[in-house]
Amino acid sequence: MPEPEPKLPAEFEELKTKGWDVEFVKDPAGEVYSPHKHEETKLHTISGDVQIRVSDSDSIMGDWQSVPVGQTFTVLEGQIHEAIVGDEGWSYWAASDPEAAKSWNH
């Protein structure tokens, strides 16, 4: 029997009522997201750990940042970013605006 999804944070409930796509994601340990960009996305850590870094221009990446359990990280529209999932894997809620997504090629 699959385990139930964790409680949706209030901020994500509100985004859902505004028409945003909201999904629960479980990434395995060591998963790597190479540098990419897309519409604004909010990520809320439920368990595990991840390191994310974002750019402040088209080519310069900033410092690696952790997104602790219970915290939300926002990737801005068009912001180049990358991530590495930690040894425990990473479970999180992800939210993005489907209207904004139409303008991006994934």
Image: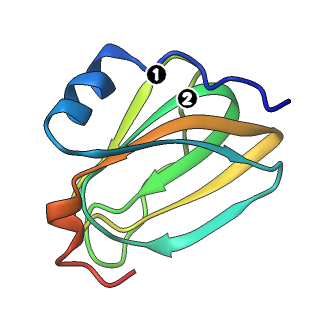
Q: Which residue is nearer to you in this view: 19 or 43?
A: 19
Task: State if disc 2 and disc 1 touch (CB < 8 Å).
Answer: yes
Q: Determine which residue is flagged by label 2.
A: 45
The three-letter amino acid code for the residue at tag 1 is: Gln
The three-letter amino acid code for the residue at tag 2 is: Thr
The residue sitting at the front extreme is 1
- Local crowd at mark 2 within 10 Å, few (<14), some, or many (≥20)? many
Q: Mark 1 and mark 2: span between their CA atoms?
A: 6 Å
Q: Earlier in the sequence, mark 1 or mark 2?
A: 2
Q: Image quarter for residue 14? A: top left
Q: Which residue is nearer to you in this view: 69 or 13?
A: 13
Q: Is residue 19 left or right of residue 79?
A: left
| Residue 81 pos. (x, y %) | 43, 62
| Residue 15 pos. (x, y %) | 22, 33
Check disc 1 and report its element: helix, strand or loop. loop
Q: Image quarter for residue 20? A: top left
Vertical position of residue 22 compared to residue 106: above or below: above
Check disc 2 and report its element: helix, strand or loop. strand
Q: Which mark is residue 30?
A: none
User: Which quadrant would the N terminus be assigned to in this image?
Assistant: top right
Residue that appears at 57% across and 35% down: 92
Numbered circles on residues, count: 2
Q: Which residue is nearer to you in this view: 78 or 91?
A: 91
Residue that appears at 48% across and 53% down: 53
User: Which quadrant would the C terminus be assigned to in this image?
Assistant: bottom left
| Residue 45 pos. (x, y %) | 55, 29
Q: Determine which residue is flagged by label 1.
A: 71
- Local crowd at mark 1 within 10 Å, few (<14), some, or many (≥20)? few
